[in-house]
Image: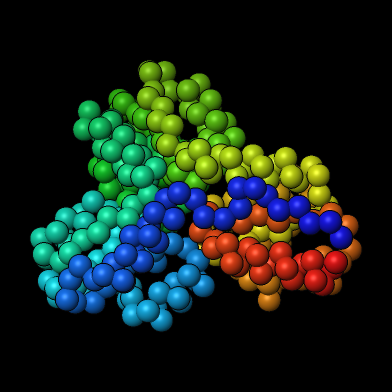
Amino acid sequence: MELIIAETAGFCMGVDMALNKLDKAVRNPPGKGTIHTLGPIIHNPQVLERYRNLGVKQTDGSKRLDPADVVIIRAHGIPKQVQENFERLGVTLIDATCPKVKKAQILIQKQAEQGKHLLLFGERDHPEVKGLISYAPEHTVFESLEEVKAMTLPQGSRYFLAAQTTQDRESFTAIREFLLGEIDQEMTILDTICTATKDRQEEVRILSREVQAMVVVGGKNSGNTRRLAQIAQEAGVFTVHVETSDELPWGELEAFERIGLTAGASTPSWIIEDVARALKATLG
């Protein structure tokens, strides 16, 4: 068996930065209270378990915290109103929002302040999306081109188009072209898809032409990881999405001679290395 590991697999800059900020807070607490993350700092169960063992707790913002507590804003960002509530409470707030997400929030807010209606390509229930739409009072969220084609947009509105930072660029391009043909007036297009996301997705497309099967490693609730698996599946190769090596389907993988391995942006290197070792040792 030949194993080809994607060069872009693993932590992106935004995840790395968020965890560095959390690590610094754990080593040198900036407050006397408990350290919390607002929701999961990243979408990886193994990483979250490590921080739980270090005493870091999660909050959803519904329970009142002590002003001495510390709250880390996760890499996905949070809704504007939630951040303002924490600021009024007086807790120590550390912003670990990915710079790419923060830029998208700022761009969306500037367009919304001009009275425009946001058309956002993203997963409705994803925390990043909930944060992005909080900066645009008028917004419509959709998850596919098919959904866009079925929509009836309000007449007389001015629109601007953006995407969740981890969305598929090819799908966004198709949506953009369709909307430009449907909306008579000029529509502002915001390029909010992260370059690192684009590079990972493009590498998976290329790698899928060179292998017979693809192993994608990362949290099952990680949007960017699920999209890597989706791209590989659409390329026609056998694809499996696992969080750890314990989930590898050996009976199916042993039928393939060339296997690709990639991982989502929130997957630590030690998990990727463990999966690679298991594949080499078992299928050799």
Residue in the image at 50% along x and 29% along y: 176
Percent across and percent down for residue 244 are: 63, 71
**Residue 135 lies in quadrant:** top left
* Quarter in which the C terminus is drawn: bottom right
Q: Nearer the viewer, residue 230 or 90?
A: 90
Relative to 231, does residue 215 appear above or below in the rendering? below
Q: Residue furthest top?
A: 185
Q: Is residue 82 visible?
A: no
Relative to 40, does residue 111 appear above or below in the rendering? above
Relative to 165, does residue 170 appear above or below in the rendering? above
Question: In screen coordinates, is 101 left or right of 145?
Answer: left
Count of numbered marks: 0
Q: Is residue 24 visible?
A: yes
Residue in the image at 68% along x and 72% along y: 245
Percent across and percent down for residue 43 are: 47, 63
* Quarter in which the N terminus is drawn: bottom right
Percent across and percent down for residue 120 are: 41, 40
How is the protein colored in the picture? rainbow
Q: Nearer the viewer, residue 21 or 136?
A: 21
Residue in the image at 43% along x and 62% along y: 42
Percent across and percent down for residue 203 are: 66, 42
**Residue 34 lies in quadrant:** bottom left
Residue in the image at 33% along x and 60% along y: 21
